[in-house]
Image (cartoon, rainbow, N blue to C red):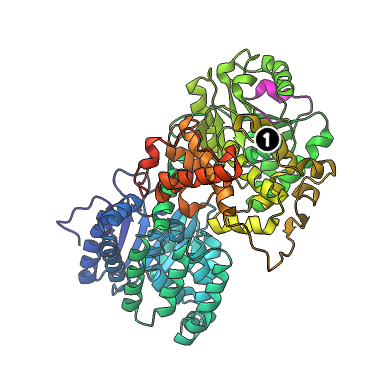
Amino acid sequence: MFEGLRFNHWKTSLDDSGIVTLTLDRANSSVNAISREVLDELGQIVERLAIEKPAGVIIHSAKSNGFAVGADIKEFVEYAKHGTVQENIENGQRVFEALARLPCPTVAAVHGACMGGGTELMLACRQRIAADDDKTRIGLPEVQLGIHPGWGGSARLPRLIGAPEALPIMLTGRPLSARRAKNLGMVDRLARADELLAEARSLLRNPQTRPLAQRVTAWATNTWLARQILAPMVIKQTAAKVRKEHYPAPFALIDVWKRGGGNIQQRLKLEARSVSKLANTPTAHNLIRIFFLQERLKNQGSGVDAGIRHVHVVGAGVMGGDIAAWAALKGFEVTLQDREMKYIQPALDRARTLYEKKLKTPEKVDSATRRLRADVEGSGIAQADLAIEAIFESAPAKEALYATIEPQFRKDEILASNTSSIPLDELRKGLQAPQRFLGLHFFNPVAQMLLVEVVRHDQLDPAIEKRALAFCKAIGKLPVAVKGTPGFLVNRILMPYLLEALRLYSEGVPGPVLDKQAKNFGMLMGPIELADTVGLDVCAAVGKELAPFLGLELPPGLEDKLQAGKRGKKDGQGLYTWQDGKPQKPEVDPDYTPPPDLQDRMILSLINEAVACLGDEVVDDADLLDAGVIFGTGFAFFRGGPIQYVRAEGAENVRQKLDVLAKRYGERFTPKNGWDHPALKQDGFAFPAAS
């Protein structure tokens, strides 16, 4: 059937029953990212299949990790640079539409990761079967890159499962499990992973008819009238979560669906034009940049064996207990030490709740629970490969602990501190093996925050740093190596922003106004809510540690709150009152007018310190700085990080704003060293290379 045709990325076979199996195996790649070459080869194959008319076609992947991870993002960047996005989108649409029109049954056999273009390839087949496995994940995450599905996803999915189910999948980008996809009708059948191809052949021979209710819903929710009624409702729901000027892609997707009629060619044309337009927006450029930054952070620990199997954590408070729980969740043997069992038990209870939420099945929950063991006596120290100290922020207390536990260490055991602000050059002074000591600074809540600061000092062995990066990768975190100066990277940059917000609060600006202004800029959470969430006691402790170094003062009123036992969310009282884990924000006088420079006072405090960190070489380069601040503080994703923000706004313009604030409010706004750094003058839309 394919005599004379040679393919680099596809393998073809024809069995005795006339069924053709197409196996995607992208050359020189560990994953199936769908490139132009992959598509062009598929186009040739489909063209031949349309002539030969086999009994059926099965499409699956030769990669053990999944079906296809989506479009090749590096190629997409090149299309965006050269203005050829629409041309290449339309090419992919033509190939997938030709596949959809084949005059024979087609089945996609899916396992592992099936994302973006991989899901659109799956949707172009008549039937879909997926491995009933925890590793199977099916989704359309393009909105997370500032665009939306472009190879027919928006044209086909709503018509397959109905708009009310399809739109949230595309608008959030969240992946589905195999069973969820089956329940929604995206997948027709599930199979054991080792029987996937055999079951795919069975599905070819006996196509499955979708339930009548699903077919009726799919039709009824995509009529012209339904689209005119539903679209405004979906827009309103989306606008409650994101602002159109910050994240235009979800709103563009809704518009494409609303305007798309019964003709798929018309729907595909709308889709291609929309994606092409979105590809030129600053939001898409910055979100794609963040994608590459995330890949870079993920890959830092690649190729290195951390040599860590057993983790011992000292300190079972919120941070220590949750670090221990997370490590056990990820498969490590963990011992958790504190002075008495009464301090450890709450951490074990929280861990159990986490495992029940994440792991679902009782067997997996019990297995993770067994990996986390209470250890009041500290006997686990002598067997551990990594010991993490997570006690309170006191240099003398930490040094005393190290003197007690270090003599018990194994030969290559690593000692890490979860300190959030104490310089490591100070903490390492009394150690016998300072070369095996570093910081692993996690963020609260551990289960949700991706970033871990890997904190250096002047005697750290680079091989130990690499092992620590590999450990972070093994537990699913994003590590950034930082210099061990006060506050490291994230707290040093975050503290001026929080303290300025608290100063404004003490000047009488209502908390909800401050939070709203920050969210208008694009921050995930406002500073007053953030201070309460972190804990006013933590803010005060870190503030006292950093204030002299940063040339700042703690604002008035903070100590009064602490003396009254109002530390924030954990006490139910702080700057806000908290109920059921949510802040009860007071109503603001509708006639209240906030100061015009309110947002600048908060945001530029952060930006100024970020530039100072760049100048002080707290991280290795500007891209890592942006990544650390984005994943560690919730800085506006669509802006690409503080350094990217300066590039986009113009370094001189931002500096002039700081000069104005310094004249008006004092020296804390004086531009710091670093504003002459060459990274600030780079192209505002420069994409970092994914490693």
> Which residue has dot 1 on it?
542
Magenta extent: 376-390
Q: Is residue 595 above or below residue 351?
A: below
Q: Residue furthest bottom?
A: 225
Residue type beneath disc 1: Val
**Are there few (<14), some (14-19), or many (20+) residues within 10 Å of tag 1?**
many
**Residue 473: in sight, yes or no?**
no
**Residue 222: in sight, yes or no?**
yes
617 relative to 266 in the view: left or right = right
Q: Position of residue 557 (x, y in %)?
A: 77, 44
Quadrant position of the N terminus in the picture:
bottom left
Q: Is residue 389 magenta?
A: yes
Q: Position of residue 221 (x, y in %)?
A: 50, 81
Q: Is residue 559 above or below residue 149?
A: above
Q: Position of residue 245 (x, y in %)?
A: 47, 64
Point 33% across, 44% down: residue: 29
Point 44% across, 70% down: residue: 253
Point 50% across, 38% down: residue: 671
Of residue 20 and residue 142, the one placed in the foreground of this image is: 142
| Helix, strand or loop for disc 1 | helix
Of residue 142 and residue 493, the one placed in the foreground of this image is: 493
Q: Is residue 139 above or below residue 126?
A: above
Q: Position of residue 665 (x, y in %)?
A: 60, 44
Of residue 399 and residue 113, the one placed in the foreground of this image is: 399
Point 49% across, 74% down: residue: 161
59 relative to 323 in the view: left or right = left
Q: Is residue 18 magenta?
A: no
Q: Residue furthest front?
A: 663
375 relative to 49 in the view: left or right = right
Quadrant position of the C terminus in the picture:
top left
Q: Tell me the quarter of the picture where residue 126 sits.
A: bottom left
Of residue 450 and residue 525, the one placed in the foreground of this image is: 525
